Image (spheres, rainbow, N blue to C red):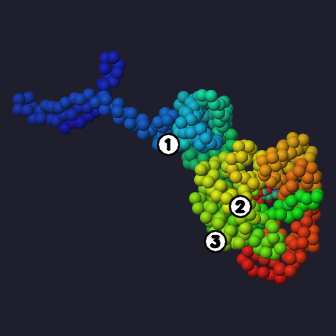
Amino acid sequence: SLVHEYRIRTRCGDYLWVLVRGVVEDCRRSGRRMAGSQTDISSRKAAEGRLRHAARHDSLTGLANRLHLDELLHAAQQRTSNRESALLFVDLDRFKLINDSLGHGVGDLVLMEVAKRLARCVRPGDHLARFGGDEFVALLGDLACTADAERVAQRMLDALRQPLQLGERTLSLSASIGIAPLWLDGRPLDALQAADLALYRAKNAGKDQFSLYFDDLRGSAQRRLDLESALSQAVARDEYVLHYQPICRLENGRPYLVGVEALLRWQHDGQLIGPQEFIPILEESREIVRVGEWVLREACHQVRCWQLLGQTQLYCSVNLSIRQLQQPDFTDRLIAILDETGLAPSRLVLEITETLLMQHSDTVMATLQQIADLGVRLALDDFGTGYCSLGYLKRFPLHLLKVDRSFIAGVPEDADAAVISRAIIGLGQSLGLEVIAEGVERPEHMQFLIDAGCRYAQGYGFSRPKAAADLQRSFSAEGCFEELWCLLPDHAANVRRIGVCTPSGSRTA
Ligand code: C2E
Ligand code: MG
Ligand code: MG
């Protein structure tokens, strides 16, 4: 029998697909013959073609999809050529913000425009794929050298930066790009993974730029993975500690201790690691929820101990992550911690950042309101470094505003910093918020704040963050603390009487 599909070119040059089926028959009269049929299967073939195309292309942008990219990449790595090839991993910066604020419809329009702009940057013969979400991959062949790939990446960055007009709205876009060769030292490389590592580096270096893959990147990714797994065991191993930094009230030119901010540290491999290094990792893995709860409990407990030792009005300030606020039972857990530790809600301040409010949802808003209803105060941390939206100051139940240390660092010499700092202080006060200046290091900073009418300050000039026991030693010093600041009146004597208290409850004379 015979079954065969083939195409025929028609007189006008088109193709017609046909299916031929036949069987051989023995025929008494003429010997053997083939009997069968020939069917026009062009429409079925066209439908199959459309399905094959759909399976390999992205429906929104029409670009190759991940499956097709794999095939193209595989084919490219099979070919031997003395020309270079490279893979570019492109990821839009802050695309989530566009999607969340302007809706998915606008997000789709942006992605289509991005696809068009990127396609104009590559040559015929190169391939462009949508990897997923806001990620695109370009496969460049026939390059004279790797610098050619950098030129294409730069062209892409420039093309994306051009303002994008969508109706009445003008958007500005940027992207980060990771570049990796398809071959390294004569061997094929896992180019997707390598370009992704380079992309991660470009993002970390501040976005809106490209970065090249180099061999040690894999090593640093491995180190990050090691760090992640070490971090996941840090709670169980008791490796976290809190340091406390005093917050002072400036009165009659003298600073008095009113509160402490709890700042997380990680004791790992004999080193004390600062939060900037590991909090982003904890946030990514959501481990921050567990660690944040530990911080809250430990800090409330410690401050309650210090209150019992005589710092009766001392308040405790704790930094929160958005992930914690997204927990539907956050308020219940907070109430439980306050009950457990005996700290009054009015003696707790929770610090949140503007970026956190930017991503606000109804859950977060409701939780913030519940927290405020409890009598716990909310502080907007690092004000001035984010979007400085005055809308937030009114919309959210905030009580305190912390002016970022980058402004204070410039005063009084830098006229701009001075004007902005004064404006933020005035703004906070006119909205009925307490304003705290961060990063007060020099006596001139303090004088500036007193002149500007700012009543609260925090910074190395008063004290660096210290372990609980070290800070407590300062409490018990005679009247005056080191350098500029003093203890709230008449508490020093109490401390000497009661002794040293730690959160675990042990006391030493
Ligand atoms: P932040 O909340 O703005 O904390 C103030 C940071 O400024 C601290 O850095 C502190 O050591 C530093 N600082 C204070 N005074 C001065 C000064 O006079 N000069 C200078 N140059 N720096 C000063 P640190 O401890 O490295 O913390 C960095 C950030 O990590 C914090 O910024 C906070 O956003 C975050 N963080 C710390 N602990 C936690 C935590 O338990 N949970 C969460 N979610 N974030 C935390
Ligand atoms: Mg803070
Ligand atoms: Mg801050």
- Viewer-proximal residue among 283 and 166: 166
Say which element carries label 1.
helix
How crowded pointer 2 is (Cα within 10 Å; few <14, some 14-19, many 20+) is rated as some
> How far apart are the alpha carbons under marks 3 and 2?
29 Å
Q: Is residue 233 above or below residue 423?
A: below
Say which element carries label 2.
loop
> How far apart are the alpha carbons under marks 1 and 2?
49 Å
Kindly identify which numbered label has been placed on residue 376.
Answer: 2
Kindly identify which numbered label has been placed on residue 66.
Answer: 1
Q: Residue at x 53, y 36 (%)?
A: 105
Quarter-wise, where is residue 40 in the image? top left
Q: Is residue 442 above or below residue 175?
A: below
Say whether mark 1 is within 8 Å of ligand 1: no
- Viewer-proximal residue among 275 and 152: 275
| Residue matched to label 3 | 236
Q: Residue at x 74, y 60 (%)?
A: 349
Say whether mark 3 is within 8 Å of ligand 1: no
How crowded pointer 3 is (Cα within 10 Å; few <14, some 14-19, many 20+) is rated as few
> How far apart are the alpha carbons under marks 3 and 1?
40 Å
Q: Position of residue 51 (x, y in %)?
A: 38, 36
Residue type indicated by callout 1: Arg
Q: Position of residue 30 (x, y in %)?
A: 8, 29
Q: Residue at x 88, y 47 (%)?
A: 410
Quarter-wise, where is residue 368 in the image? bottom right
Kindly identify which numbered label has been placed on residue 274.
Answer: none
Q: Are marks 3 and 2 in contact (CB under 8 Å)?
A: no
Residue type indicated by callout 3: Ala
Q: Is residue 475 above or below residue 452?
A: below
